[in-house]
Image: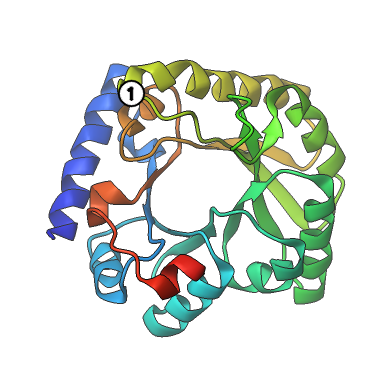
Amino acid sequence: MDVPGNIGRIREVVTQAAARSGRSPAEVRLMAVTKTVDDERIAAAMRGGVDIIGENYVQEAKRKLETLGKGCEWHLIGRLQTNKAKYAVRLFDMIHSVDRLELAAEIDRRAAAAGHLMKILIEVNVSGEETKNGVPLADAADLVRRIAPLANLSIRGLMTMPPWFDDPGEARPFFRALRELRDRIAVERIPRVEMTELSMGMTGDYPVAVEEGATIIRIGRGIFGEREKTKQQEML
């Protein structure tokens, strides 16, 4: 698997997609999604210049960080249980999956104990699918307003995962809806809220996401190829 080569090809596609929408490719950061990926390939991705490592599980990230070191930013993209918040605030540079006030309050409390400001994104279920995590689109702005006063959190933007389509273009309305929500919230100028990040787009649809304003694209298969899960990894 040519991990650096894959990264280079993805960056070329990002450059082309950014040009189509009048954006600079420098506005888009590449996250390598490393769920169940072995250490050797993650190290290759870090050497290849990815901007962010994205992990789904706190426990798996802890082990990998101890082995691989920081190297670049590490973000949590998986669902976070409140009882893992105390570990998450020490491991990650940003948490993408905040979708309820209870979780935000616990992250805030743990960040205060750790003595630092925790950057977060609000996860939005734009599609309304029951199988997806995230606050419903209609409730997202209110959740931002309610979380904003928490002193040890810094809301930096929004994250979503659209439905899967054979045609990536069909995901466009969902990406556009997140961008439009971001713009509506930004106009409110809520104190301590920076609507600068849109985490959206994966291997199958990231060019469309870039065209619609993504600032972080989350790529796993496009960098590392298909994953082979072991029984132990499936239990993580």
| Figure quadrant of residue 201 | top left
Q: Give residue 72's quadrant in the image.
A: bottom left
In the foreground, 198 or 123: 123
Residue at image location 67% in from the left, 68% down from the top: 89
- The residue nearer to you, when weighing 80 against 144, is 80
- The image shows residue 36 at horizontal and vertical percentages of 38, 65
Any part of residue 70 in sight: no
Q: Is residue 66 above or below residue 154?
A: below
* Quarter-of-image position of residue 230: bottom left
Establish if 25 lies above or below 173.
Answer: below
Q: Amino acid at mark 1?
A: Pro
Badge 1 marks a residue whose secondary structure is helix
Identified at 49% across, 24% down, the residue is 175
Return the residue at label 1.
168
Q: Position of residue 37 (x, y in %)?
A: 33, 66
User: In front here: 152 or 83?
Assistant: 83
What quarter of the picture does the N terminus occupy? bottom left
Task: Estimate the x, y position of residue 152 in percent, counting from the top left.
Answer: 79, 59
Residue 13 as seen in the image, left or right of residue 104: left
